[in-house]
Image (cartoon, rainbow, N blue to C red):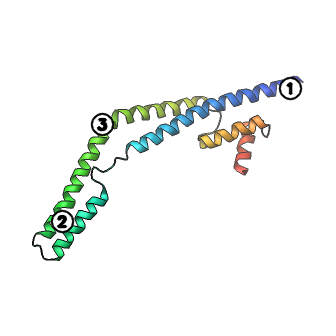
Amino acid sequence: MEKSTKENLEIKEMIEALETSLHQVAEAEGLQGEIHRAYRVPYPIPIKYNVLVGFILYMLYRNGLALGGWLLLGWFGWQICVNVVYFMLQLYRKMPEIARWKDKVNTNIEELEKTCIVPQKYWYSSALQHFIKYLKSGRAKTIQQCIEIYEED
């Protein structure tokens, strides 16, 4: 009877540790998604308008406008410059926030290295959720059994 109680306590402790790790991993995954989205800056002038103007300039060039080719090159060169400057300004504004997110991700990873009872290979939400499910349902009693079941599924 005492062995069963001890096993239950160990399983509860493993579940609590996994839930803590899951929270840290989920937060890190969310922040990494935010970092990824922060680097995506929309163009100030939509691409369809750039293509339309480029097509019109090309047609003028093809129909004999002497400076049409230069206008076409100038237009696309100007758009490239505008978009690069706009992108850099938008990114410059977001850099403090991105730095905070990266620091928080690094802090979470350091905490996981200290406290996580699962190998680093399984530090993602889906795996940790499955491990918790296996322990709660009684399919596994150790982390190694959770890993084996997870690999089989």
Identified at 26% across, 50% down, the residue is: 84
Q: Left or right: 66 with respect to 122?
A: left
Q: Is residue 36 left or right of residue 150?
A: left
- The numbered mark at residue 72 is 2
Label 2 crowd bin: few (<14), some (14–19), many (20+), radius 10 Å: many
Percent position of residue 32, x then y:
47, 40
Label 2 close to label 3 by CB (< 8 Å): no
Residue found at x 21% / y 53%: 81
Check disc 3 and report the residue beneath it.
93
Circle 2 — which element?
helix
What residue would you read off at disc 1? Answer: 3
Query: Where residue 131 appears, x then y in whole percent?
Result: 69, 39
Quarter containing the N terminus: top right
Q: In which quarter of the image is residue 26?
A: top right
Q: Percent position (x, y) of residue 115?
A: 60, 29
Dot 1 surroundings within 10 Å: few (below 14), some, or many (20 or more)?
few
The secondary element bearing badge 3 is classed as helix
Q: Which of marks 3 and 1 is nearer the N terminus?
A: 1
Identity, as a three-letter code, of the amino acid under mark 3: Arg
Q: Which residue lies furthest to the left in this view?
A: 66
Q: Is residue 47 left or right of residue 25?
A: left
> Which residue type does callout 1 highlight?
Lys
